[in-house]
Image: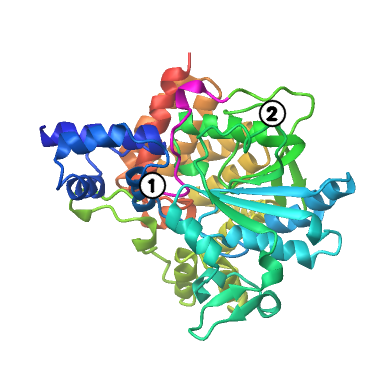
Amino acid sequence: MEWPKAVNRFATFVERRLGLAPVPNGGRELEALLAEKSARSGLAAYLEKLEAAGSQDVELRTLAERLTVGETYFFRHMAQLQALVAEVLPRVQREGRPARVLCAGCSSGEEAYSVAILGRENPHVEPERLFITGVDVNPRAIERARKARYAAWSLRSCPEALRERWFHVLPNGDFEPKPSARERVHFEERNLLEEDPAFWAPGSFDVILCRNVTLYFTPEVTRAVIARLERALTPGGALLLGPSETPRGFSDAFEVLQVGEAFYHRRKTGLTPAPVPRSLEGALPPAAALRWSSPGGAVPALSSWKPEPPREPLGMEQAWRLLDEERYTEAQAWLEQLPEPDREQSSARLLRAVLHFQGGHFPEAERVGESLVATGRAEAAVYYLLGLCREQAGDEGGARNRYARAVHLEPTFALGHLRLGILARRAQEATPARVALRLALTLLAHEQPLHLTLFGGGFGRHGLMQVCQQELRACAEVP
């Protein structure tokens, strides 16, 4: 079998079963994996065996392990978790039933244990009636979740008081949640798109967290995942997505609710759940980002990009570094200790707004952004951030206005064109969507590293190009 045909066949399999599509001319990592796995049996025999594999086949599970990379830590997006514990869980239990929580795409378990700990911290939650299930396609991640041994890096956003109350320090310096935080948490290896009538039965869960998971799916897979989660939720059940995710365009079954500075989606009552698209049943979605490498390694993942901080104030360099490492709490603390003149610099205020957004404090992020607009010197990045805030508030018209302002001020702002294209596609405006997305795809090769650091949402340059490709394919469905 010719090598290019084998690679394309392998890539098609990965897209169909993992929900991801590599960017054309990329995928060196995928090629290397195919060469490694087919070395003994040959390309044709290996691919035939793989395509016949069931969901529990050892080889398929190995690929899922190799091609998914989970990035998580304790108490990520704390404001949203606090809203869940303060508002949603007590309401469920007041209705006379246990609170059943699903962490979909749980990776190594930090999110599930975070919910358990915060539930025990809140006097309005009855911990003996709180049951948490974590599922992930990556068998190694599930093994780590069950072992519950974590390096200090996983607790980088954990308040010191919670660390002292809920974790044992092991002799090697790692941390382990105490037994009381683990007793009603269990984990399963499971594919989000694989049918299991018992597990996904209607009304199986009161709360589903699926945060920073659908970001990496094709639109078809996202639609199938949202349909399955909707069906499994109780009427009035809560769906918690990541800051840059929304069910809009995939389901009309949810309404947006705000608790403090956090948002979540509540399944409307009186609706019949949407059917899971049959053409996608059995597809194998990932738990987190697939890091495609580019030819020659020219396009690294987000974590390897270094922002280009402004020269003044000098103390901002440390804040940019902490942001790049997703150490948001520490970056916020660093900003607050800067001298007053430095804190009021536009770059520092923009970073403060971004940190509020990353922490789930959307109204505060918008307030800081609007204060920069009021100075009359707001740059394109400020309007882009305001567009993200408007999307979180469910105001897609306002979001489009702000993204349009961003690309007017900076015509080469690729991310602004990308969001405009996505919103146009959701609004069934096929031609404007295609124009914006094609422009974004062209411009992303030269997008400023600083923009990727501030607004990449976990994607590197190449991952965002993949999103563009997926959105362009989705435009074919728009009349």
Instruction: Residue at the far top: name it.
Output: 479
The magenta stretch is 276-289
Residue name at image x 56 percent, y 23 percent: 427
State the image quarter where residue 464 is shown. Answer: top left
Instruction: Residue at the far bottom: name it.
Output: 171
Left or right: where does residue 108 sit relative to residue 366? left
On screen, 12 above or below 79? above
Q: Is residue 288 magenta?
A: yes
In this view of the protein, which residue sits in the foreground, 459 or 10? 10
Crowd class of label 1 (few under 14; some 14 to 19; many from 20; radius 10 Å) = many
Residue 133 seen in this snapshot: yes
Residue name at image x 34 percent, y 52 percent: 66
Q: Which residue is mark 1?
A: 61
State the image quarter where residue 181 is shown. Answer: bottom right
> Can you tell which mark lies on residue 253?
2
Which numbered disc, 2 or 1, marks the residue that appears first in the sequence?
1
State the image quarter where residue 165 is shown. Answer: bottom right
Which element is circle 2 on? loop
Q: Is residue 84 magenta?
A: no
Residue name at image x 62 percent, y 56 percent: 186
Residue 328: x %, y % from top left: 56, 66
Main SS of the magenta part reads loop
In this view of the protein, which residue sits in the foreground, 122 or 251? 122
Left or right: where does residue 29 sit relative to residue 431? left
Instruction: Residue at the far left: name it.
Output: 2
Left or right: where does residue 44 sit relative to residue 135? left
Left or right: where does residue 475 sit relative to residue 423? left
Residue 400: x %, y % from top left: 56, 34
Residue 255: x %, y % from top left: 72, 34
Q: How many marks?
A: 2
